[in-house]
Structure formats: C-alpha cells, structure tokens
C-alpha cells in the first residue's frame, strides 16, 4: 500500500502502527499550519485552536507517566512538568494567546517530543493509544480551523430521487476488537449492537441550498408551527439582533443564496451545494415544512454503509439525525483523554438535549470519513459544516 493511500484509509488509520502514525501526525500538523498561515494575522480563536494540538500531546503523551498503559492509565496520575507554563492561560478565554510565531514554536517543540517518544514506543495497541487519540484530536482541529476560515464549499450535485431501502437487521456502532473491530475505537462508537431497521425512504444526498431557500421563501422562519419548542426559543433569542432569518454566514436566501466567505466577501452559493451551517432546529423545521423527517441513526448508518453503489452520497457536510445523544449499550465509562464525552444531563430541564451529527464534511481529512463516526453537539450549533437529509414520514 502506498503512503498516501495508507494516510487516507479511514479503517487502517485506526490500527496504525508507529511508522504510519508518525507520518499521519506530520501530515495533520502540516494541514493545521497551512490553515493558520491563511491569515496575515491569525485571530485569537485560531491561535487557541492551534495551541490545543500541542497542549493535548503534552498532557497525554509527553507529561503523562502512565501513557504506555493506554486506556488502563490513571487519567489523574502523575504528570511531568510542561515546556510552557503559560499554556493554560493562553487557552483561557480570559487570557490572550501569544503571537503566531510563538504558537508555531510551541507546536514545533511539542511535536518533536511526541515523535521522539513515538519512535521508542512498543508497536502495540495500549502504548499507541494516546498517539492515535492525539491524531484524531489534531485532525478535528484542522476541521475547526477550516470552519473558522470559511473557505471552500461542498460540491454542487444534481438532485436525485429518494432511495428506498428494505427492512434490515443492522449492527449499529463499531464492533469490539474481539469481534473484528479496531483496537482503537472512538468512545461514541462503542459498541456494535443489533437493531431492527424497518424499510424506509431516504434522500441520496443532503438538502441543498435551492431546497432550503424554497423553505425560507415560503415563510419558513416566520411560521412558528414548523418549529419545535427549542427552535422557537432559538428564533426568539436571535430576533433581538436580527440574525435568525437565515443560516449562519448567509446574507440572502431569496433570489439566490449569498454566503459570506472568509477573505472573499459575499459569494453566490451554487443551488446544488449542500446547505450548511444549519442548526438542528432549522433541519427539523425544514422537514416539518416538507412533510418529511430526519433519518434515525440506524437508518443513516445503514444507508451510508450499504447504499453507496445506489447513489447515496455522504461526506459533503456533517448531518443532523433524529434523536438525542446517547451512549451505545456496553460503552462503559469514558476512556482517559476521550474526545466524545457523553453530555451531562440537564437536570433542570432548561436546555434541549444534545443531538448527534453523523458523517463528515468536505473539510474533513479523508482518513476520518468513517460511516460509524458520530459526534454529540448542542442543537443550536451552527459553526460547523453541518446540514441534513430527510426521510419519508
């Protein structure tokens, strides 16, 4: 297998040994630094995102004396001193990050230590755990910088007829290593369990700008009956500033969708591009208006895994699905350094529960395009490249 294809393999990267991990960590860092260099003077938020790559590697690899125990380590165990005592202040919203050159210097030092330690690490699963975890973390930071930059867009696609999928018994989630799964599996995907999926009809691609603009032109943002209780509260909260009349970064929805892009001003979005920066509230309201619904997680995962040959396309935008965030049966306690912590329940009942995003976006590195991947997010999230597709009611 060639190096580029190995770096891009979403299944193989989960089993990556020392050599591939070393190349992948360098690749991820190069992506991150290129994004950071896109700004003549990076904003504070971009600098903090970049700094967090080094902070994570220091905390869980360079400083944690039990790192070779992997998930069996004590997450609160002894840590060595770090190379930069101000890192917590730099990452704090109340503190000011350093200049870009200082950030790059910190990243260079932390990566050098990480790679040196990796070179002397046994090529086995537990000792490699935090290196694999650090790679996922940095790959996600690359996405975060892309969203902050507001450059690029998903491809425009011709709208196609919905797909019908027959009833199926499906293993939802990733299998345990003993059942053929990866030794390193994100917490949110643990573990595979059988579910019965009735027959369903699903869009072959996410809802595009033309479809979403039709909803807005038909008064979608003004018809309260289309919105959930949480959605109406979200609309009202934005009404004071006049920002809840269209998705984030959209300047105009009627007469052509005009989107603000970083460094390029306002551009016209292609009608066939997946609509993005949508909250789950907006996705649910569109579905109500269209007489459709969001897919369930089993439906989405089954279609993404089995229907690609029939035209099911995913990876243009992260996609909201129906239901609230929950751990799969048998997931157990969160592993040390986990990036997908199960959201704490809102005991006061004042906030809508977290939702789930499936898939990947056009800004996601190819090695993270995994059909089992899932993330938890507040339903009001609109900073990510998030969209949705629909199913027949």
Image (cartoon, rainbow, N blue to C red):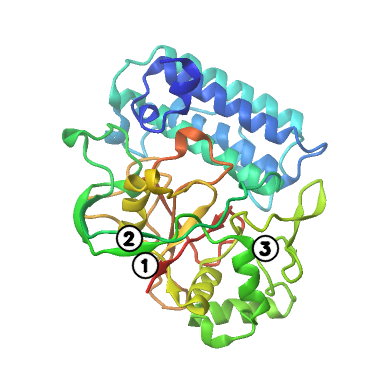
Residue underneath mark 2: 326
User: Which residue is at the front of the view, 344 or 263?
Assistant: 263
Tell me if label 1 and label 3 are in contact, CB under 8 Å: no
Between marks 3 and 2 in the image, the one whose residue lies nearer the viewer:
3
Question: Residue 343 appears in which quarter of the rendering?
Answer: bottom left
The quadrant in which the C terminus is found is: bottom left
Tell me if label 2 and label 1 are in contact, CB under 8 Å: yes
Q: Which residue sits at x=62%, y=30%?
A: 31
Could you say whether the residue bearing mark 2 is in a helix, strand or loop? Answer: loop
User: Which residue is at the front of the view, 338 or 368?
Assistant: 368
Asked whether the viewer can see residue 191, the reply is yes
Could you say whether the residue bearing mark 3 is in a helix, strand or loop? Answer: loop
Q: Which residue sits at x=22%, y=52%?
A: 170
In this view, 94 is above or below 199: above
Tell me if label 3 and label 2 are in contact, CB under 8 Å: no
In this view, 322 is above or below 269: below
Question: Residue 294 appears in which quarter of the rendering?
Answer: bottom left
Tag of residue 323 = 1
For this view, does 352 lie left or right of residue 43?
A: left
The picture places residue 40, in percent across and down from the top left corner, at: 83, 36
Quote the CA–CA distance across marks 2 and 1. Answer: 9 Å
Work out whether mark 1 precedes mark 3 in sequence or the reverse, and give the earlier one: 3
Residue underneath mark 3: 248
Other residues around mark 2 within 10 Å, as few (<14) / some (14–19) / many (≥20): some
The picture places residue 227, in percent across and down from the top left corner, at: 52, 81
The picture places residue 39, in percent across and down from the top left corner, at: 78, 38
The quadrant in which the N terminus is found is: top left
In this view, 59 is above or below 195: above
Quote the CA–CA distance across marks 1 and 3. Answer: 23 Å
């Amino acid at each position: 297998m060639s190096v580029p294809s190995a770096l891009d393999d979403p299944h193989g990267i989960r089993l990556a040994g020392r050599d591939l991990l070393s190349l992948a960590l360098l690749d991820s860092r190069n992506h991150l630094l290129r994004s950071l260099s896109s700004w003549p003077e990076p904003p504070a938020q971009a600098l903090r995102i970049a700094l967090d790559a080094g902070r994570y590697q220091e905390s869980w690899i360079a400083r944690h004396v039990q790192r070779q125990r992997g998930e069996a380590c004590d997450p609160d165990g002894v840590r060595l001193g770090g190379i930069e005592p101000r890192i917590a202040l730099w990452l704090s919203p109340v503190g000011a990050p350093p200049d870009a050159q200082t950030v790059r210097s910190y990243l260079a030092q932390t990566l050098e230590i990480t790679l040196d330690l990796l070179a002397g690490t046994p090529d086995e699963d537990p000792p490699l755990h935090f290196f694999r975890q650090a790679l996922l973390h940095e790959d996600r930071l690359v996405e975060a910088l892309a969203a902050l930059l507001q450059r690029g867009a998903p491809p425009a696609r011709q709208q196609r007829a919905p797909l019908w999928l027959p009833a199926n018994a499906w293993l939802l989630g990733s299998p345990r290593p003993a059942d053929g799964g990866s030794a390193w599996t994100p917490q949110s995907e643990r573990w595979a369990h059988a579910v019965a999926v009735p027959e369903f009809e699903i869009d072959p691609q996410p809802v595009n700008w033309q479809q979403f603009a039709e909803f807005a032109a038909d008064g979608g943002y003004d018809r309260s009956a289309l919105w959930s209780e949480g959605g109406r509260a979200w609309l009202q909260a934005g009404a004071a500033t006049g920002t809840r009349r269209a998705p984030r970064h959209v300047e105009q929805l009627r007469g052509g969708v005009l989107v603000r892009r970083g460094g390029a001003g306002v551009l016209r979005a292609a009608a066939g591009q997946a609509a993005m920066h949508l909250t789950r509230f907006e996705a649910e309201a569109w579905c109500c208006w269209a007489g459709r619904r969001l897919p369930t997680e089993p439906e989405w995962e089954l279609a993404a895994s089995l229907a690609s040959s029939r035209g099911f396309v995913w990876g243009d935008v992260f996609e909201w699905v129906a239901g609230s965030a929950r751990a799969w049966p048998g997931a157990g306690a969160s592993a040390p350094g986990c990036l997908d912590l199960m959201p704490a329940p809102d005991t006061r009942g004042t906030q809508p529960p977290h939702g789930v995003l499936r898939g990947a976006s056009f800004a996601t590195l190819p090695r993270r395009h995994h059909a089992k991947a899932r993330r938890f997010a507040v339903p009001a999230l609109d900073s990510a490249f998030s969209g949705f597709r629909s199913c027949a009611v």
